[in-house]
Image (spheres, rainbow, N blue to C red):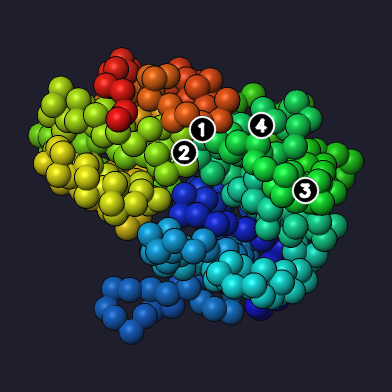
Amino acid sequence: MTPSAPTLALVESPVQLLNVLEWAHTRRGREPLLAAVPAQPGPRAGRHRPDPRTVADRLRIVVLPPTDPMSRGQLRRVAGIARDEGYAVHWQEARGGSGAPLRALAALGPAVRRAERIVVGDPFSRFVQLLLTPAAAATELVVVDDGTATMEFVAQLGRGERLRRWHRTGGGPLSRARELAYAPVSGAARRRLRPGEGRRVELFTSMPVTPLPGTELRVNDFAWTRARFGPPRLTRGTDLVGTSLVETGVVDPVRYLEAVRALTREHGVTRYFAHRRETPEKLRALSEATGLEIVRPDLPLELIARRGPVGRTIVSFPSTVVHTLPYALTGTGVTVAVCGIDPAWLAPGASPRARGFLAGVTDTARDVRRLPARSAPAAG
């Protein structure tokens, strides 16, 4: 990895990388560090590429990809857009092998130690928490959205709790032993994520949160996405946004299928935009049961919707997009609707936090149409 820039961003998902681009866009007018780089003519007519001599002096984005192919594919696409915008993007494998985490820590440690500002997309990530440990020189830490998890992150940090994803259950004895062994690292990360003497903390988010005292809040209204793409061409049909609540063990798969079938019938849904974590088997079953066209987006949905074509109505279960799409699609005439999760849909092993968290995601969404949850027949 080449020498670090004063600002180092650590991202693990396509949405996090998109939100780093949005954050950098809001800072360009105030910081020469993040201003657009001089461009050089490319080999193809009409195409310009950033001058590589100036890139290393600016924001450097490190992508720590997950192992699933859909996420990796979307990350590569968004990384390509980031490079076209003039940003330096470094792809660092940190998973998928016994030695990958150690190699990644060794490769990134010097850059983290030298960075004056660190931008993170997932404060729940254990790998990111490990990387924050040597970040002694950083006088500013920025947290950009990793979707609705930002809401739980702020709540847990405010209550002084250890950081734990809302859909996770308690786990067995081995899991608890690992948590205990990891506690010092987690505790150090929590302290770094709070403002302190000589350290600013900024929260850049589309989510409805109340920041901790001393934390600077900046609203992500997807200004870069709106300036860069669209407006989209609108179709006559309705689009439905899929969710990975089945894959994370929150919602029963049979009840989810029945809910999708009901929404398709009642709202004239023609396309189903799959979440990147949804399994092929589940999507095949949905297609056979509903006749929907299954679309597997190669970019975050905010970019897909903004580029179009997109339905005049977009229906979603409680998820990040009910907060982000109203910003991204401002002025386009698209209506975003959210269908609540009936408590009866929850899987037997769902986290005790699931019901309240999902209701909060629905209730706090702005500029959306709210649809009642449809009761589905019992599984089995």
Q: Earlier in the sequence, mark 2 or mark 3?
A: 3
Using the numbered discs, state the Cα–Cα distance from disc 3 to disc 1 in whole angstroms.
Answer: 21 Å
Task: Give neighbour class at mark 3: few <14, some 14-19, many 20+ (Cα, 10 Å).
Answer: few
* Residue type, numbered disc 4: Val
Pointer 4 or 2: first along the chain: 4
Rounded to the nearest angstrom, the CA distance separating label 4 from label 2 is 23 Å
Mark nearer the viewer, 4 or 2: 2
Q: Amino acid at mark 1?
A: Gly
Q: SS class of the residue under badge 4?
A: helix
Task: Check disc 2 and report the residue beneath it.
Answer: 249
- How many angstroms separate mark 1 from mark 4 (CA)? 25 Å
Label 3 element class: helix
Q: x, y percentage for residue 184? A: 85, 49
Q: Residue at x 78, y 42 (%)?
A: 190
Q: Which residue is mark 4?
A: 154
Q: Which circle marks residue 177 in the picture?
A: 3
If the image is split into quadrants, where does the C terminus sit?
top left
Category of crowding for the residue at label 4, using alpha-carbon neighbours closer than 10 angstroms: few (below 14), some (14–19), many (at least 20): some
Residue at x-position 50% and y-position 54% = 13
Task: Please name the residue shown 58% across and 67% down the image.
Answer: 95
User: N-terminal of the two: label 3 or label 4?
Assistant: 4
Q: Earlier in the sequence, mark 3 or mark 1?
A: 3
Q: Determine which residue is flagged by label 1.
A: 349
- Amino acid type at circle 2 is Gly
